[in-house]
Image: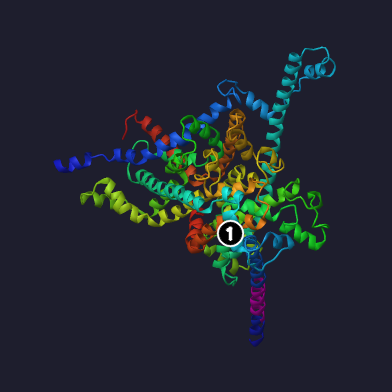
Amino acid sequence: MASAAQRRIKSISYAKYGYIFILPFFLVYFFFQFWPLINTFVLSFHGNDTNVEEFVGLDNYKTILFETEVDNDILLRKSDKLEGKSAEEKKAMIKAEQDNQALQSQHEFFKKSFGNTLILWFGNFIPQIILSLSLAVWFTDAMLKIPGKGFFKVVMYMPNIITAASVAVLFLSLCSESKYGAFNQILHSVGVVEDIESTASDDFVKFVTGTWEPRIVIMFIQTWMWFGNTMIMLMSGIMGINPSLFEAASIDGATSGQVFRKITLPLLSPIMVYTLVTSMIGGLQMFDIPYLFHKGTGISSINPNVRTVAVFIYERFHTRGTSDFSYGYSGAASVLLFIVTLILGSITFYLNRDKDAIAKKKQRKKLAQQAKIKNKQFGGLSI
Amino acid sequence: MSDMKSVYGQGKDNYMLKIRLKSTILFIWFVILTIICLLPIYVLLINATRSNNDISGGFSLIPGDYFATNFKNMRTLEYAKNAFKPLIGYRNSAIITCSATILTVFFSALTSYGIHVYDFKLKEISYTFILLIMMVPTQVTSAGFVNFMIKIGLQNTYIPLIVPAIAAPAVIFFMRSYLKSSFPLDIVEAARIDGSGEFRTFLTIAIPMMKPAIAVQAIFAFVANWNNFYTPSMILLDGDKMKQTLPMMVQAVQSSDKFTDFGIVYTCIALSIIPIVIAYVLLSKWIVGGVALGGVKE
């Protein structure tokens, strides 16, 4: 028998405080992130430049994903009928051809930037994971007597906290294609660069304006910045593995290679998948370093061989006051990026799902069903 | 018996030798990696103390005596003075970073506490939602974000750089895990019996108990905001130097054709990274420990 006072206490509900506490988060989220996300989708179905208001359906997606067919009529007319036309008709024709080329180049730009993103991601992720994993295993190996582990950890993580913009400009200066670039100076002393006093950039190794050289430099910078972070994450994963497993293995005479393959790697797999996916999403967003790794202002000065999807998106909506807003292309590329992220994210969730919990849930369902059947046998009466 | 002993002893010696050899080789490898990690920063600091001519003369590891001149040139030469204003950059970055960091940790603590302590209908749904939106990359929303901010006239202000910090799903995820492992609900009950209101319980009991988690997340939020180049550069469009953040000023050095004196360029970059490097050296233990905590799932 509960007294009246007890009953009253029980009836106090604190649920409203739950809503009050989480309200600011949701308000800000919907205003500054969710609505912009929807807005990106909306923009991707609208026009570019001056026709931002115009609804164009899937045209932007078509333009950036597929090649626009070159209008043969226009080319034909241009070649042999240009003579007998009035000035206005000529102008219209030239305009149509220019539009066609512009569309074509959006596709070329996007294709190239997507390829660059993949190349840069692979080139930074593979060395990074090999380096981080080996370092994490060595750092956590209790048998090895290495002095100053704490110091090494701190130093290896350091590049990660330095402003990426500064890192990009620092390497840009070190890679300079002139007598001022440290890398070219070193190559000169080895004999690769012959004339260090030359003023023509052709005489130097093209670390900034070449095709593969800047890519390799950017892969190096990304690895340099991120291997410490990945290493510490993997280390905490390895330290979470029950140490008695390692002890048992070493008593049984397992070599370090066997321990790595049979114990560390299988038990580390959830964290490995997590690292893989966070790094994939991070790689798709790669922006600061590819964007700043060039000299000069304006879109045209960016080396097309290192332009990533994030840079493509940014260039399209960020035009510094000129009228050339290409929100449509930008939005369409963002939505495509979103879909790729979604697919990658679901794969992780699928691989990382708690198998035990799912098995338990199934069992519980089964039991419930059996109970139901039993109940039916008693004429639906619950016992 | 003695035979056995010697065999055993030999095996042990071999084993110890192997371990020692491996440790030494690894130590050398770690030293090499340390050098690779530090060398670019070291070269940066060295080059900031050398004149343009010295830099063109070759690569050096010995500091020069030109830093004062480089610094003076940076402050007096017209093009450098206009593009790179370190003090204004520090001030602007500090304003944005500090406000954003405080908002992030306070509101994330509030949200995670609300989800952890109270039972309400939408509790599970809202937490799942927060986990889901953690995956959305910033780049995906940015086109719509900029378009929307320009429409409501918030471009060139700090509001879009500071206020969105309230919604930080990853920080909430971390703090919820922390609360789960170290905040028993009995404490809230006890506080209620003693007559403490809900907000007072949060401010005077929960926040002090969450200090370790708040400290780690505050450091990370601070570093992320301080280094952020992407968001400020898409919101601050009018090129007003008095409003720009430090990474944007670094970009000004990169994009200007006038910066031909490499001594000045290196001095500018060095000034842009020195505060964060000092902060890292002071807080490194916490930072490395924080990354490790973030790596542990659940």
Which residues are drawn in magenta?
B10-22
x then y, percent, for residue B16:
64, 76
In the displayed structure, would residue B298 be above or below residue A37?
A: below
Q: How is the rendered protein coloured?
A: rainbow
Q: Which sits in the foreground, A363 or A227?
A: A227
Q: Quadrant of residue A90?
A: top right
Crowding near the residue tagged with mark 1, few <14, some 14–19, many ≥20 C-alpha atoms within 10 Å: some
Horizontal relation, residue A181 to residue B289: left or right: right
Tell me, yes or no, whether the highlighted magenta stretch contains residue B19: yes
Say above or below: A63 vs A264. above
Residue matched to label 1: B71
- Residue A63, can we see it? yes
A372 is higher (above) or lower (below) than B228: above
Which residue sits at x=20%, y=49%?
B195
Q: Position of residue B252 (x, y in %)?
A: 60, 46
- Residue A73 located within the stretch drawn in magenta: no
Q: Residue at x 31, y 50 (%)?
A: B203
Q: Relative to the observer, which residue lies in front, A326 or B201?
A: A326
Say which residue appears at 68% left-offset and 29% top-offset. Answer: A65
- SS for callout 1: helix
- What amino acid does circle 1 point to? Phe
Most extreme residue toward the bottom is: B2
Question: What residue occupies the far left of the structure in this picture?
Answer: A4
Position of the C terminus of chain A by quadrant? top left
| Residue B278 x, y percent position in the rendering | 51, 61
Number of labels in the image equals 1
